[in-house]
Image: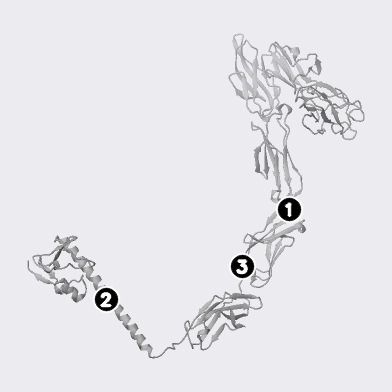
């Protein structure tokens, strides 16, 4: 497929017929005006990358091709940059990609081919087998081999020999049709008793095998490795393994080996070989974008390094440090973000790059400076101690190059008292005690998200005087007594403040404001009673306070007839006497009941038959009946007596019976069905 005959000029967008297996690849010709020249036809596979080779008189451009469907392709040429030819560092612009389109990205120089050696040694003994392989970025291409810069006419991926000879020695390179020529690989085929074999390409972090090799068919022992003529190690077999090799391992190496020949072991030494270690990735460079920014700006730090092309698949990890302290741990991201940067983010930054094999390198350091938009605010009051009733002004001080764009807000005890505005003052025209508290201010810019808060300061509004308290003298007021109300308020301000007082009864003023804190009522009358309050004020500061409510009752004199008074006194005395008698009777009953229960317990403890004590609520038994348990049966005797049996503590043979006379007779005398005789009424009976 060929492009337009006039070529493509800078920025041209051209519709091209596009098949799934065919796509045009652009290359820059040698035309004087620098326009894109004719295109070449190539057969490619889906999603395959194409690498055109360098052309005479121009620079071939790498083209990445992705074919999605069999449709037309939208293609845009690279930026030429005036009429100058594109150099290898310039990159083209990609056209927009829609469904069913192919996108062509012009990106710069093409990738190189790579030559590998199997076995992986650059020095080979004559007669050994060796294979060279050409590795291209994409398959199904033509292969071109070069020895000592002379092309070998062999279109094959590999060059191999089963018995190497000295004429095969030389520098080998390979190239695909659309790749750059590989780096040279030196192949030395020698005739020697012992040689030291070193891989042709060694990168830091590699695991490297060094072989002290001798001709097959001879018995050999005691291989020894030397670096710069110093013994490194003695080992048992021919291979010496170095894991995670470092750049410090580079140097001049040789080896010795004992070989059995002519009936005995003789020591042979190889020639010196240079062990070169290539850098896996470059020393990282750190940069910041944008630089010299103001606080509030997002700053991005980037750690840049370049992997060696043959090791592009090596995964790297990045870490960032500020003033020697790690601020972002190792991660695959090579960027560190300072979101809404602050002045405290200023400092010296470095980055480190490492591999899984712990090859670690540190970048240069850069100093990041974040310019402060404004200082941290401070709250300032017009007086350290505010006076109640006076004007109080708080000022929020913040300075900076953009101080005129600042917005201010004020808080008391974490509650906003003034929202954001251009004024940096908060005024209270008449200060009160509840205006005391912790005050702070918050400052922000009108065009950024920078917000700063001051340190809270304590503002105490001093009261001029305490809350007034009202009291009356005397405490009890009778009709005709002189009554005095006093309003007490204590001065608390250092200022000599004049306090005035007023008195109110049931909400009506009875004494207007004056310097006296007393209200007098001569010869009080019942109608002088009511709910009284007093009010104190400092006239110069417009401060007023009202006391609690005091309820006053004026007791009236007795005005009834005189002859009724003696009768009233007699009636009250009679009621009092009856109450005293009832209390005495009740006490005697309680005492007797207690004694009776105590005596019953004593008898029971001594083993005497238990005499039944009639409960107080049980009626007296009728004549002619006996009481047995819960049954009342006819009695065989006319009278029923109750007896209490006691044992004299001095003579247990003597029983003391307290004989109670007829229940009916006793109850008629005392009016008490549960009455029992006193100790003096007992009769002693000899057993």
Whether residue 47 is situated above or below residue 341 in the rendered picture: above
Using the rendered view, name the quadrant where residue 391 is placed. Answer: bottom right
* Residue 372 tag number: 1
- Color scheme of the displayed model: one colour
Whether residue 109 is situated above or below residue 460 in the rendered picture: above
Residue, disc 2? 584
Q: CA distance from mark 1 to mark 2?
A: 97 Å
- The answer to whether any part of residue 574 appears in the image is yes
Q: Position of residue 416 (x, y in %)?
A: 66, 60
Proximity of marks 1 and 3: CB atoms separated by less than 8 Å = no
At label 2, counting other C-alpha atoms closer than 10 Å, the crowd grade (few under 14, some 14-19, many 20 or more) is few
Residue plotted at (32% across, 80% down): 576
- Element at label 2: helix
At label 3, counting other C-alpha atoms closer than 10 Å, the crowd grade (few under 14, some 14-19, many 20 or more) is few
Q: CA distance from mark 2 to mark 3?
A: 64 Å
Q: Is residue 113 left or right of residue 595?
A: right
Q: CA distance from mark 1 to mark 3?
A: 37 Å
Q: Is residue 562 left or right of residue 302?
A: left
Mark 1 vs mark 3: in front: 3
Q: Is residue 409 left or right of residue 258?
A: right
Q: Quadrant of the C terminus?
A: bottom left
Q: Position of residue 460 (x, y in %)?
A: 62, 68
- The answer to whether any part of residue 678 appears in the image is no
* Residue 434 tag number: 3
- Element at label 1: loop
Mark 1 vs mark 2: in front: 2
Q: Quadrant of the N terminus?
A: top right
Residue plotted at (64% across, 11% down): 216
């Amino acid at each position: 497929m060929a492009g337009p005959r006039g070529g493509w000029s800078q920025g041209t967008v051209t519709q091209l017929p596009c098949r799934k297996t065919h796509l045009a690849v652009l290359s820059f010709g040698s035309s004087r005006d620098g326009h894109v020249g004719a295109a070449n036809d190539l057969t490619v596979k889906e999603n395959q990358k194409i690498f055109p080779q360098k052309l005479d008189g121009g620079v071939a451009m790498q083209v990445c091709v992705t074919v999605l469907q069999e449709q037309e392709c939208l293609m845009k040429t690279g930026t030429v940059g005036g009429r100058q030819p594109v150099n290898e560092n310039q990159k083209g612009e990609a056209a927009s990609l829609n469904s069913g389109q192919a996108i062509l990205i012009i990106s710069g120089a093409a990738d190189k081919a790579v030559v590998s050696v199997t076995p992986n040694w650059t020095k080979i003994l004559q007669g050994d087998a060796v294979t060279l392989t050409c590795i291209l970025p994409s398959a199904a291409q033509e292969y071109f081999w070069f020895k000592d810069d002379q092309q070998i006419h062999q279109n094959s991926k590999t060059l191999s020999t089963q018995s190497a000879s000295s004429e095969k020695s030389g520098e080998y390179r390979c190239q695909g049709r659309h790749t750059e020529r590989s780096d040279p690989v030196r192949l030395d085929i020698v005739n020697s008793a012992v040689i030291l074999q070193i891989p042709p390409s060694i990168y830091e972090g590699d695991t490297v095998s060094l072989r002290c090799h001798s001709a097959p068919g001879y018995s050999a022992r005691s291989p020894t490795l030397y670096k710069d003529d110093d013994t490194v190690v003695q080992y048992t077999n021919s291979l010496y393994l170095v894991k995670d090799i470092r750049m410090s391992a580079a140097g001049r190496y040789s080896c010795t080996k004992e070989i059995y020949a002519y009936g005995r072991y003789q020591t042979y030494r190889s020639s010196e070989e240079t062990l070169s270690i290539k850098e896996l990735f470059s020393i990282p460079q750190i940069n910041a974008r944008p630089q010299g920014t103001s606080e509030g700006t997002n700053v991005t730090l980037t750690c840049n390094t370049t992997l060696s092309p043959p090791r592009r698949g090596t995964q790297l990890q990045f870490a960032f440090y500020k003033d020697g302290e790690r601020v972002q741990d190792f991660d695959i991201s090579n960027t560190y973000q300072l979101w809404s940067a602050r002045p405290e983010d200023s400092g010296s930054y470095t980055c480190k790059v490492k591999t899984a094999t712990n090859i670690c390198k540190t970048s240069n350091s850069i100093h990041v400076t974040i310019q402060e938009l404004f200082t941290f605010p401070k709250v300032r009051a017009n007086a350290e101690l505010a006076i109640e009733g006076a004007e109080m002004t708080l000022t929020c001080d913040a300075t900076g190059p953009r101080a005129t764009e600042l917005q201010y807000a004020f808080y008391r005890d974490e509650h906003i008292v003034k929202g954001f505005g251009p004024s940096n003052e908060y005024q209270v025209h008449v200060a009160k005690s509840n205006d005391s508290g912790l005050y702070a201010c918050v400052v922000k810019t009108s065009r950024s998200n920078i917000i700063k808060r001051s340190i809270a300061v304590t503002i105490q509004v001093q009261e001029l005087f305490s809350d007034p308290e009202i009291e009356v003298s005397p405490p009890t007021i009778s009709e005709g007594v002189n009554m005095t109300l006093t309003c007490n308020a204590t001065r608390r301000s250092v200022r000599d403040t004049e306090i005035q007082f007023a008195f109110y009864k049931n909400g009506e003023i009875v004494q207007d404001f004056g310097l006296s804190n007393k209200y007098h009522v001569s010869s009080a009358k019942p109608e002088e009673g009511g709910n009284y309050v007093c009010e104190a004020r400092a006239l110069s500061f417009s401060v007023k306070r009202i006391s609690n409510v005091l309820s006053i009752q004026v007791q009236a004199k007795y005005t009834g007839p005189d002859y009724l008074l003696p009768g009233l006194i007699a009636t009250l005395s009679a009621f009092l006497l009856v109450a005293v008698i009832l209390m005495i009777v009740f006490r005697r009953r309680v005492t007797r009941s207690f004694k009776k229960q105590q005596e019953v317990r004593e008898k029971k403890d001594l083993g005497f038959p238990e005499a039944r004590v009639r409960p107080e609520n049980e009626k007296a038994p009728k004549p002619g009946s006996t009481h047995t348990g819960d049954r009342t049966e006819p009695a065989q005797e006319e009278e029923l007596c109750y007896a209490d049996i006691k044992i004299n503590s001095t003579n247990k043979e003597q029983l003391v019976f307290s004989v109670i006379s007829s229940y009916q007779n006793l109850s008629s005398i005392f009016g008490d069905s549960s009455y029992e005789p006193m100790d003096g009424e007992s009769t002693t009976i000899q057993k």
